[in-house]
Amino acid sequence: MGTLGRHHARAARDLEGATCSGVFDADPLRCQEVGRRLGVPARSSLEELLAASDGVVVAVPTSAHERVARAAIGAGRHVLVEKPIAPDVAAADRIIAEADAAGVVLQVGHSERYNRAIRAARPYLERPLFVESHRLAPFAPRSLDVPVVLDLMIHDVDLLCALVEAPVNSVAAVGVAVLTGQVDIANARLEIEGGAVANLTASRVSMSRVRKLRIWQRSGYLSLDLADGGGEFLRLRDGVSLPAAPPQDDGAGVEGLPSVVERIPISGSGEEPLAAQLESFRRAMLGEALPPVTGPDGRRALQLSLAIQKRIEENVAHSGQT
């Protein structure tokens, strides 16, 4: 059970209106330790956990997502499966089909949908025309079974899909394997139907942690810090009309910006993203609301992320890199 699994268990334990039925890990010593630390039952098998649960969170290596999710669905349990939903689209389709046939909730753990900054920015979001993200993290020996595109960039791919609800027309991407056998740093440029463009960068070999999202639209510019849960919205002040042609330079320069631009601080508040995600899962299980991130949503983010990874691999093959 990795760090994310422990955080899920802790959030489930603290979730109002629900009871954490326990944890299970293939490593019995780790399972016992997590159960002891959190004060929740440590189950001896997946079957035992399923028997005690109405719904389960699947936070295992991506390669095991399909097996564990389908076992839970087969037992009639609701499932929240961590991102990416599966290692490939065919596996995602099988999970989605089985959940539909069983009539159970299938939610995908794209927790950035619940980020405080994203929630606070919603009133200002309109029709993004250019989206830029930087998601950089120091190296850590986790999720090394997948490239950085499926480990980190997929968060921003999902956010992009939610912000710009239009098909992607073209994908250009580059990436480099730095410390592992997988791509550790990647950049993708996506051109979207309707004219929007996105530039996404992700790295797991950086010296510092950065989670920035910038959005340009006709109504203004959003700069969000997803790590801090805040940011700002800049827009033209009411009643200000800029000339079509620039006047002669009066030396004001940047100092004149406050006179034409209104800066609106964005400060997110409320539940931590993981707790908000689990609360949405609880409500979906009870039939009170649809899951905010459905199986098809997870499939869409996976499919686009795999397209980005394919472009990277094609570029590597073309350049003769190893």
Image (cartoon, rainbow, N blue to C red):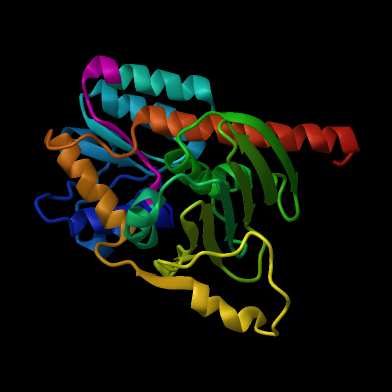
Q: Position of residue 86 (x, y in %)?
A: 47, 31
Above-or-below relation of 73 to 142: above
Q: Position of residue 191 (x, y in %)?
A: 64, 36
- Give the magenta-colored segment's residue range: 100-111
Q: Nearer the viewer, residue 111 or 13?
A: 111
Q: Position of residue 319 (x, y in %)?
A: 89, 38
> Toward which corner of the image does residue 198 lie, by quadrant?
top right
Q: Position of residue 320 (x, y in %)?
A: 90, 37
> Which residue extends farthest top?
101
Q: Residue at x 78, y 31 (%)?
A: 314
Above-or-below relation of 290 to 201: above
Q: Residue at x 63, y 57 (%)?
A: 204
> Which residue extends farthest left?
17
Above-or-below relation of 206 to 298: below
Q: Where is the C terminus found, in terms of image quarters?
A: top right
Q: Residue at x 24, y 64 (%)?
A: 270
> Toward which corner of the image does residue 66 lie, by quadrant?
top left
From this viewpoint, is residue 145 visible? no
- Indicate left or right for 233 with 22 as reference: right
Q: Nearer the viewer, residue 269 or 179?
A: 269
Number of marks in the rendered image = 0
Q: Nearer the viewer, residue 119 or 88?
A: 119
From this viewpoint, is residue 90 visible? yes
Above-or-below relation of 258 to 274: below
Q: Is residue 209 magenta?
A: no
Q: Residue at x 58, y 40 (%)?
A: 196
Q: Nearer the viewer, residue 112 or 71?
A: 112
